[in-house]
Amino acid sequence: MRYGYQADIPPIKEFPKGGWSIVWHGRVKRNPNVSSEPTIELFIRSKQGDQLIDKTIEVGTGQLPILKIGTYWVDGRLTTGTPSKIKKFTLPGIHISPETTRTIAAWEKIDDGRYAIKPHSLKIPREAANSKCLAIEYNDDPYGIIIPASEIARLYYCNSTDLSHSAFWGEYSFAVDQIVNPKKCGYDEENDRAIVHLRQKFETKDAWTIGRILFDETAREGVQEIHNSLLRYMDTEESGLFNCGMPFIGNTRWIAKGIQTGTKDHPRYLVLQLQKCSHPFPFSELQANRDNNASQADPEKDIPPGEKKPYQRGKNDKKNGNKGALNSEAETNKNFPITNILNQSSQFDFLEDKEIIKPDSKEYNEYKSVPNQPKTPSPTGFGTGQGDYSQDSTNQQAKIKRKKGVGADLEMLTEAVNLLSEEGMKIGIRTVDHMPLSGPEGKRQWAYLESSSHTKRTVIVIDIERNNKHYCWVDIEQRHKGECAVGLLKHKEPINEETLSLILRNLSRLKGVWVGANGKAVDGTNIALKRVLHTWNSVTKLVNCLESKTLELT
């Protein structure tokens, strides 16, 4: 199996050494060490010689956005690898309705005792036999598509740490005011615009998911079912298992990864990873504001400074930075800064080319800044719990969110590579890594996406062979759209690691400028170079760009 590491994702301490695939999600349990965050079981599998070894680990539910079934982990680090039996497929014309969907167990028996999910296809562990799945009628087969409830939850409701916490703690049912200020949320019928006012802990982009839930009863009932089912199954043999509902009724197209079973004429699909959904959101526009936004309030309406709440923005500890593995062993200390775990994706057709609308001003500022950050003990690791202020809380908090930077989109690039491979092009992802530093570690420099937190820019390199020429597509994470271009490199032979490393070091020294007054990134090599502007916003456009630009550089 060829793979690269997903450099934006920290390792997870609970994974054993070696290579392991996530086979299935299991029960949600109370974590005695981290009261603010339950854990979820992961059934993992490793091939050691001729034997398959199964283990069960438990990690915080706030990490669910990156815990896709079928992903491959080495020494606790997420890779780009996927087990060979898991394939990518497109499923058009899916109709979601109460009549076409039903909840089943992972070991559900149908058709005269046969299993809905064939045991040999995935070998779901016995301990997960009663875990919940959704069976969807497809091609006139009531079990044409089967998908774990946990994957529905992951894509539609839990695509950041904070969103995952809200879903599993039942805040959409019992404490929606912990998510938004209901008095400042509403719907602009004239512009078909949802207005969402977030509480301070949420990322602005979380408003897409929250808005969908607030303004669509089906989505609201779907996410509420996560917590409601945990309560319903409490003190039964199904304790800790949860169900989840779809967020819409109607037709959709899924791009997914999973296992195709059945026959050639009557295929069935076990969906393990949802990658993209075509169904629209219940509004055309989204306006989002937050309790702690940076805009100035109207001075005539602002509240007196003495009545404002103190708000301390986290600053990354330069000494400790982002080092360490995610773990669920101790409660996070809230005085520690927040680190983003990047989850690159363009998961919904509806969101392509969409921007969140922000109001020009606000009525008043509820928060005031605090000049000095309290001193805290040095962290030994970090986790995704919501945290406390106790002296023995020694984890740095991590939030799994959509990335702030643009470019270097692994999900989109992977999809484009897969499509081009199916069309016969020799193409593959070589590496997913960080840009090399051009100066001493800790010193401000271009290779850091955020110098204050020492967060390095991600670089993704794709190898292409076409017409007996060898190309490298080098895509780098940017702070802003259009800030720097992709580099398309060409050589008569495969570009070796030493040469590529030299080019990346040059590029880092030149602050991302491939060709400029200070030189070229390919200086010292015999590599041809073409700059490619970041103009695509969909996989289709990226595929066309990869095809056309390699032909242009002959």
Image: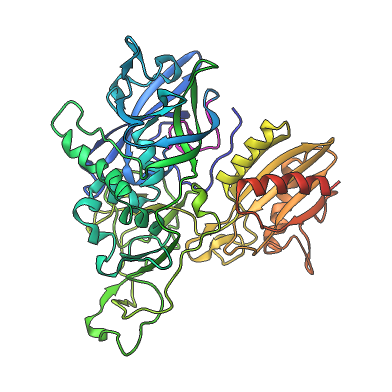
Residue 242 position in % (x across, y down): 26, 35
Q: Front-most of 463 and 277?
A: 277
Among all residues in the image, which is located at the extreme left? 235
In the rendered image of this protein, does residue 401 appear above or below residue 126?
below
In the rendered image of this protein, does residue 166 appear above or below residue 153?
below
Q: Is residue 326 visible?
A: no
114 displayed left or right of 452 = left
Residue 352 position in % (x across, y down): 54, 54
Q: What residue appears at the point 58 percent right and 45 percent down from the top-left corner? A: 412
Please tell me in which quadrant of the rendered image residue 296 appears: bottom left
Q: Front-most of 76 and 106?
A: 106
Q: Is residue 535 visible?
A: yes
276 displayed left or right of 538 = left
In this figure, what is the number of numbered marks? Answer: 0
Residue 226 position in % (x across, y down): 26, 41
Q: What residue appears at the point 65 percent right and 39 percent down from the top-left corner? A: 417
User: Magenta span covers which residues?
Assistant: 68-83
Q: What residue appears at the point 23 percent right and 53 percent down from the top-left corner? A: 171
Residue 355 position in % (x across, y down): 50, 63
Q: Is residue 28 magenta?
A: no
Q: Main secondary structure of the magenta part?
A: loop
Q: Front-most of 90 and 323?
A: 90
Q: What residue appears at the point 84 percent right and 36 percent down from the top-left corner? A: 467
- Quadrant of the image containing the N terminus: top right
Among all residues in the image, which is located at the extreme top? 112
